[in-house]
Image (cartoon, grey):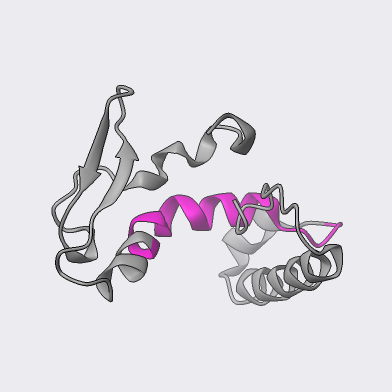
């Protein structure tokens, strides 16, 4: 949600603005580094780069999950809701034992999760 610019962020508003500005800077640099034919697809007059963020997240969500779980203890588990609404537990480091990473719910509005 943070990457995609959809986090409810109910905390400190100054920290929220700082985080959002940092993300804008990062995705501006990413957009500038793209090939010219692709770069124009992500032109954003407001500098938010929401479309680029969405596409980046779609391509990297599984790797982000691996990064989060790889340093976890070997016996760590994560409660998660599966695709069909049943609840289960994710086992295994680096997300290797899961067909679906828990981020598949990231398109459900945050207040409904």
Q: Position of residue 101 (x, y in %)?
A: 31, 48
Which residue is nearer to you in this view: 59 or 68?
68
**For the point 30% across and 66% down, which residue is it?**
69
Q: Position of residue 90 (x, y in %)?
A: 22, 48
**For the point 56% across and 70% down, which residue is it?**
35
Q: Position of residue 94 (x, y in %)?
A: 22, 65
Q: How many marks?
A: 0
Q: Quadrant of residue 74?
A: bottom left
**For the point 61% across and 56% down, which residue is it?**
52
**For the point 60% across and 33% down, which residue is it?**
109
Q: Position of residue 3 (x, y in %)?
A: 60, 59
Residue 61, magenta (yes or no): yes
Indicate whether 48 appears above or below 19. Answer: above
Q: Quadrant of residue 88?
A: top left
- Prevailing secondary structure of the magenta residues: helix
Indicate whether 75 appears above or below 78. Answer: below
Residue 50, magenta (yes or no): yes
In the picture provided, is 30 more to the left or to the right than 14? left
In the picture provided, is 94 more to the left or to the right than 59? left
Residue farthest to the top, as pictured? 84
Q: Which residues are magenta?
A: 45-64
């Amino acid at each position: 949600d943070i990457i995609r610019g959809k986090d409810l962020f109910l905390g400190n508003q100054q920290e929220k603005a700082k985080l959002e500005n940092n993300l804008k800077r990062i995705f501006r640099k990413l957009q500038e580094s793209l090939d010219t034919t692709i770069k124009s697809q992500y032109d954003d007059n407001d500098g938010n780069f929401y479309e680029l963020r969405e596409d980046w997240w779609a391509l990297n969500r599984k790797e982000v999950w691996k990064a989060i779980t790889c340093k976890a203890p070997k016996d760590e588990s994560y409660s998660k809701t599966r695709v069909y609404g049943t609840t289960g537990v994710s086992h295994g480091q680096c997300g290797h034992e899961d067909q679906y990473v828990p981020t598949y719910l990231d398109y459900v509005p945050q207040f409904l999760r």
